[in-house]
Structure formats: C-alpha cells, structure tokens
Amino acid sequence: QNHCIGELSFRHEVRAVKMRKDRVVVALANKVYVYRFKDLKLLDQLDTCHNPKGIVALSSDLSSNVLACPGITKGHVVVELYDIRRSNLMKAHQSELAQIALNAEG
C-alpha cells in the first residue's frame, strides 16, 4: 500500500506544501509551484514577493480549482481561478501578509 509515486526536489528550501486529491502545491521563499498529483506534472509556477512563511491557500473542493498566494508586491494577493483561466491581483494589506485562507469553494 505505501509506495512512492514520485519525488520533487528544489534548489531552495520548501516553506509549505498544500495537497488535495488532484493537486500538490509547493511554496518556496519567492515562488509557488502547482503540480498534478497523479503524475507530478508541473501545471503552473507563480513568482511571489519574499514569502518566508510559505503562505499559500488551495480550495479544498475538487470542483473548484482556486489558489491564492502573495503577489510579487508586498501586501498583494494573487487569486488564480484555474477553471476559468483567470488571475486576479488585489491589494490586501499595506504591509506583509500574515496569512491567506480560502473556503472550500475558493
């Protein structure tokens, strides 16, 4: 039952990992990677501002492919709506973000 389906390696320290049945999201200090779970195919990569806490959120509902992470500018949030291929950037705070959360649907 317990077997390795693959391995991901990075040149920089992994700050956070979010997973659901179809996605693996890896946050580094300045980048977020999105992989398909079944074969670890890279689906997207997003540049972020300095993100030492690995702040990232992924909708838990499998019918909704929404991801939120810091933008490249401090205090901004990028919301990726993968189902409709749309990206929204919003100014959420004047200083660094402390946390991002999404509800089940995103």
Image (cartoon, rainbow, N blue to C red):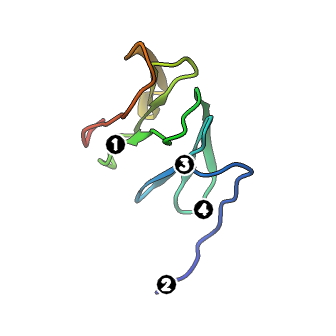
Mark 2 belongs to which amino acid?
Asn
Quadrant where the C terminus is found in the figure: top left
Mark 4 and mark 2 lie on one chain; the one further toward the N terminus is 2
Mark 3 belongs to which amino acid?
Arg
Q: Nearer the viewer, residue 98 or 69?
A: 98
Mark 4 belongs to which amino acid?
Asp
Closer mark to the observer between disc 3 and disc 4: 3
Closer mark to the observer between disc 4 and disc 2: 2
84 in relation to 39, above or below: above
Mark 3–mark 4 distance (CA, rounded to whole Å): 22 Å
90 in relation to 66, above or below: above
> Does residue 63 appear left or right of residue 32 in this picture?
left
Q: Residue furthest bottom?
A: 1
Mark 3 and mark 4 lie on one chain; the one further toward the N terminus is 3
Q: Residues within 10 Å of mark 2 (few under 14, many from 20)?
A: few
Closer mark to the observer between disc 1 and disc 3: 3
Residue carrying label 3: 15
Mark 2–mark 3 distance (CA, rounded to whole Å): 25 Å
Q: Which residue is pictured at 58% across the width and 29% down the height?
A: 48
> Does residue 7 appear left or right of residue 90 in this picture?
right
Residue carrying label 4: 39
Closer mark to the observer between disc 4 and disc 1: 1
Q: Nearer the viewer, residue 46 or 82?
A: 46
Residue carrying label 1: 59
In the structure shown, which secondary structural element does the residue marked by tag 2 occupy? loop
Mark 1 and mark 2 lie on one chain; the one further toward the N terminus is 2
